[in-house]
Image: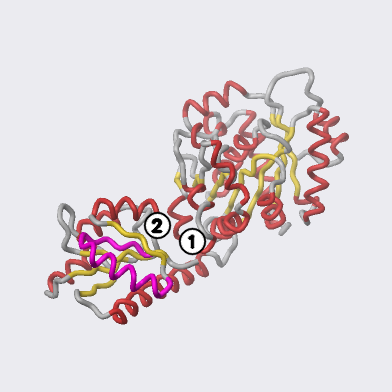
Amino acid sequence: MAEKILIVDDDVDTLRLVGLMLQRQGYQISAATNGQQGLGKAVEELPDLILLDVMMPDMDGYEVTRQLRQNSLTAGIPILMFTAKTQLDDKVTGFEVGADDYLTKPTHPSELQAHVKALLTRTASREKKSTVEEGSQRAYTIGVLAVRGGLGVSTISMNLAAGLFSRTQAEVALAEMVPGKGTLGLDLGLAGQKALVKFLSSAPSEITRERVKIALIPHISGVKLLLASDHPSDVHLISQVAQYEAIFEKLAALTRYVVLDLDSGLPPFSQKLLPECDDTVIVLEGVPNTILHTKALIEDLVKLGVKKERISVALNNRVRSDTQLPATVVQDKLGHPITVTLTPAPELLTQATRMQTAAILCQPDGVTSKQIMKLADHLIQNEAVGK
């Protein structure tokens, strides 16, 4: 995929000429005719390089650069300033506000191309080095799923992630992986999230470690969040398997633990990611049909290459009902050990939503917290023995 370059210049002739030169070199071009428009496009498109004119009305290039550097989404994008000014002080000002390179007008096409290529190469090299340094120890990855929706996968994922952080104080990332079905953003007061949608709509090569790092939202629980959108129409992006692999790879290089909220079933991206996870947590309830479907899910996972001993089962009794089978019966019918049984706690979950946090933080010494910590401890022990 060609690198994208955003050109910001109020001179239409310059936009056309420079854009044509760079397009001929194989770059993808986006253009803006003023500083404010340039800022908007930079945030929306996250280009690989910004070519920025200094002398523009209303907002000059220096101010645009300042604002780009103050925004975490655009702070790392290289900026090549392009201007008719030749005074040394003007160049110094450009570098002081955060520009990476400087060219004066008019410039020869070969000089422009050389500077652009050098900046992009330098940035790619820096990111590769950073990835090696930060990714030398791959995260311990945990996929959480169920046979169908509504069994509490997101709730358990959030509380498990918070439990891992509480127990280890290590960096933990939680990623909702199904666009259009996001619930955590709504529960945590973080509605309107678009990061996952943008990644899945991008080419895999555009999903860089730095962009994934920027997209992670810190939460009071200590967990860093990559949240799915809550617009149902976004679910069509679920077919972007290569993008999912890129997201997974970058997340695993950024934190000590990664918890993936995989929702329900085995869509192609889950089939690709689950064999790469270190552990899998399956959520079910004590109802005969759900038990049968979960048994089939475990069989399918094993066929995909997931080791059976890496599959942990969480029996989630969400409601108080005599129709729920006891854990011993569920385990017998399932033919697989149950790692933890969660007792009903509707009032606690309502309180957690009201407080926009994980349930285990509302009542750290409560029964639900102890049950979640049992699951977290089980996974930490799996990690320790090198499962």
What residue is shown at x 45% (from left), y 33% (from top)?
A: 189
Check if mark 2's residue and mark 1's residue have beta carbons within 8 Å: yes
| Coordinates of residue 309 in the picture (x, y in percent) | 79, 51
Callout 2: 10 Å neighbours few (<14), some, many (20+)?
A: many
Which one is nearer the viewer's eye here, 382 or 76? Answer: 76
What residue is shown at x 48% (from left), y 25% (from top)?
A: 354
At label 1, the amino acid type is Glu
Q: Secondary structure at mark 1?
A: helix
- In magenta, the rendered stretch is 5-26
Q: Which mark is residue 206?
A: 1
| Coordinates of residue 129 in the picture (x, y in percent) | 47, 72
Q: Which mark is residue 46?
A: 2
What residue is shown at x 64% (from left), y 44% (from top)?
A: 262
- Verify whether residue 386 appears in magenta: no
Q: Mark 2 vs mark 1: which is more N-terminal?
A: 2
- Verify whether residue 9 appears in magenta: yes
Which one is nearer the viewer's eye here, 252 or 267? Answer: 267
Callout 1: 10 Å neighbours few (<14), some, many (20+)?
A: some
